[in-house]
Amino acid sequence: MSSTADSAAALPAKRTRSADADADSPARSKPKTNGAAAAKSKVKVKTEPDEPPAKVAGRKRPAVSESGTDVDDTVSDTDESMPEAEPEASNSQPKRSSISKSQVTDDEDVGSAAKTKKPKKAAEVKSESPEPKGKPRSKRGKSDKSDNESGSQKPASGKTEEEEEAEEFKWWLEQNTDSTVKWTTLRHNGPLFAPPYVPHGVKMLYDGTPVNLTPASEEVASFFAAVVGTDWGNNPTFQKNFFRDFLEMLKQNEQSCPIQEFSKCDFTPITEYLAEQREKKRAMSKEQKQVEKEEKARVDALYGWAMLDGRKEKVGNFRVEPPGLFRGRGEHPRTGALKLRVMPEQVTINIGPDEPIPEPPAGHEWGQVVHDNTVTWLAMWKENVNESFKYVFLAATSSLKGQSDFKKFEKARELKKHAAMIRRQYTEELRDKLMATRQRATALYFIDRLALRAGNEKGDDEADTVGCCSLRYEHITLKPPNIVVFDFLGKDSIRYYNEVEVDAQVFKNIKIFKREPKREGDPLFDRLSTTLLNKHLNKCMEGLTAKVFRTYNASFTFQQELAKTPADGTVAEKLLAYNRANRQVAILCNHQRTVPKTHSNQIARLQDRILALKYERKKIKEQMLEIDAKLRRKRPELAEPESDLDDEFIERHEKQLEEKEAEKARQRLEKENEKRAEEGLSPLKELPPPKRNASAPDLARLEKKLAVVSERISIQKMTMVDKDENKTTALGTSKINYIDPRISAAWCNKHGVPLDKIFNRSLREKFKWAMEVPAEWEF
């Protein structure tokens, strides 16, 4: 299989296939094609199957009255017995349906923008289409060709970059757009597949004896050899899953193979070979690196751009995941499983109906080709480990992703108008006599107050992670009078542990929900599902889901915490306040991480940096006292010793300073001798000593230098405190996905903090629509 355009055959004269679009999000979309395409397809995209309501093990369904209400479905706070099971307001048992279009991911919806003056039309933005593989190129000059190969774009209008940027497509200034149709024309070159495996011939050992393997088996052995000695390689679950799939690969490809036990396998020869290859790559010459860089630029220019409604837009990750061993996050039960190579026959291409279809690699065909303008993905396939769908989207900086983010945060802002009503309603329903209503109200209480994820049911072979609606009996314990203890694995198998003081009625409800005959393994909310909860929320506010609550609470909490920013503080003090506000949101959303392995070294380096600055301040103070001895009496703090600055550090630091000075002198001498060699002069053995300023140091200048060094010490101290406080908290997830970026932009404008201190360049591009809000803007 080839992954390059050069090996692709010429594009057939007619390859387009018609498709009716009915999908509303990537996770739940089923591309429609005509009969020919469907017959040819090797991948089937299906919606979620209907699921029966959750039930307590061993319990019979209750009788249903003629009115549609369960006979034993009511509950009072004085009841001592647990009500019988499943409440539903219909004579037939309802099924859990797929989430509706208004309830699905925010990623696929196009946000409505503010009603302001329209920018220039998209057609006026000068941009070339990416040339599709297989289609003959039009005649162009040499300059055009070089631009294309380097991935750059020369403005057709001859305008400067600043003028072109001024004409960029500012979708957020347009009128409200259709939230169903995402594009009218779409053109791209498809995904890039991993290159075929090249065997290295290094043999692994089994019970001390080298083993001959076919290339397919050798590739899988190399996957494990690459993680030997790491946490992954030492993980028993990882080892078990890998060896199971490795044995299966050996059965398929080896006629006779002695490998039977993992404990007798020795991958060291392959591990050493891979280490040598990494060293060779690090030692590549400048010319080799340049060739590699140019090849990457060529691939990026070919696959990294799409034409969307006449505009050139960057594609996100256009590379199909290469085969390997699945890592997973947390204690994932499938970690170590073999990820198979994705073939073109598994891939569905989404492209405009009138556009040329990208050429698949030679000898292959696409699984399906669809023309669905209600979704934003360009290609999709199903991976084998978790049987989940993978997508190629436009980049985070694209207009479609920007509109999706904009709508997501606007929906959360809209919730602010309805929050009081919804809270009032679920507070009243905490005492409702219908068990299903009471469970729903209690779940909403937790989702609103604790920013819990809604959660979905998991299969037996999936990671045992839960959310609010899928909490089980053992995940919650009660501590009288009103403390609820949560202890479960959340998303990515991150443990959620929280002891929360709750309202008396909520405590009483949980006590009722945990009554016998419930036991470990039984659902806490046995009459509730995420689908039912979101249907109820959608009645309260159009498009409202449990996830919107999470975004709303994260943004609202962040804005409240930012109010603590010191108005007259330094930039460093304001940044510390910003990160502390961000940390509160990360804690609320349970965005945790393990302490980085480099944390202690980072702290140690910061401490040494602070001590070095204190040494410099000590020397400045000594100089000031030498100039004016009266300062010892007028300003006694100048004579005080610097804290934490001991003789051992001073000796070590002075030695380091001497070594640095000697290295600088050596470099100056080399540079001087190079210059003398060019002029035909003999080299110098040493440089003449630099001229010293004969004038005594000025007291005012030293005073200014003292203030600068003291400020730098203060900044380094705050940096160290900030880094230590954040060692177990992942700030980026909440800042990028849950906090409205306009809050940060407004805060920067209000407090005079540069935007690049908060958002790096890629995030400023991603949130370009949010960067120009005024200082008084509020969520």
Image: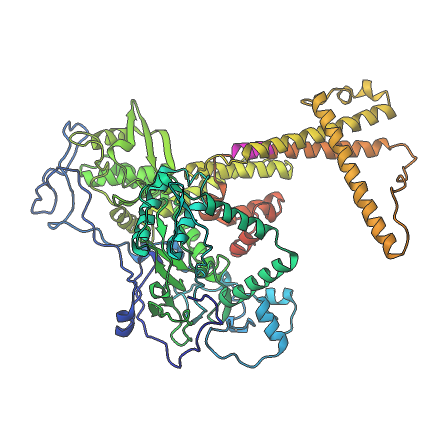
Indicate the quadrant where residue 31 lies.
Answer: bottom left
Indicate the quadrant where residue 157 lies.
Answer: bottom right
In the rendered view, would you say 159 is above or below 640? below
Quadrant containing the N terminus is: bottom left
Residue 301, x across and y down, in percent:
54, 66
Is any part of residue 411 visible from this angle?
Answer: no
Residue 735, x across and y down, in percent:
49, 45
Q: How many marks?
A: 0
Q: Nearer the viewer, residue 759 or 488?
A: 488
Residue 320, x across and y down, in percent:
42, 59
Is any part of residue 84 visible from this angle?
Answer: yes
In the displayed structure image, the side of residue 121 where residue 701 appears, left or right: right
In the displayed structure image, the side of residue 570 where residue 328 appears, left or right: left
In the rendered view, would you say 375 is above or below 660? below
Residue at 26% x, 49% y: name it.
Answer: 531
Residue placed farthest to the top in the image?
Answer: 633
Residue 636 magenta-highlighted = no
- Secondary structure, magenta segment, majority class: helix
In the rendered view, would you say 674 is above or below 332? below
Residue 400, x across and y down, in percent:
45, 61
Indicate the quadrant where residue 420 lies.
Answer: top left
Residue at 37% x, 37% y: name it.
Answer: 450
Range drawn in magenta: 720-726
Q: Nearer the viewer, residue 403 or 51?
A: 51
Residue placed farthest to the right in the image?
Answer: 694
In the displayed structure image, the side of residue 424 where residue 154 appears, left or right: right
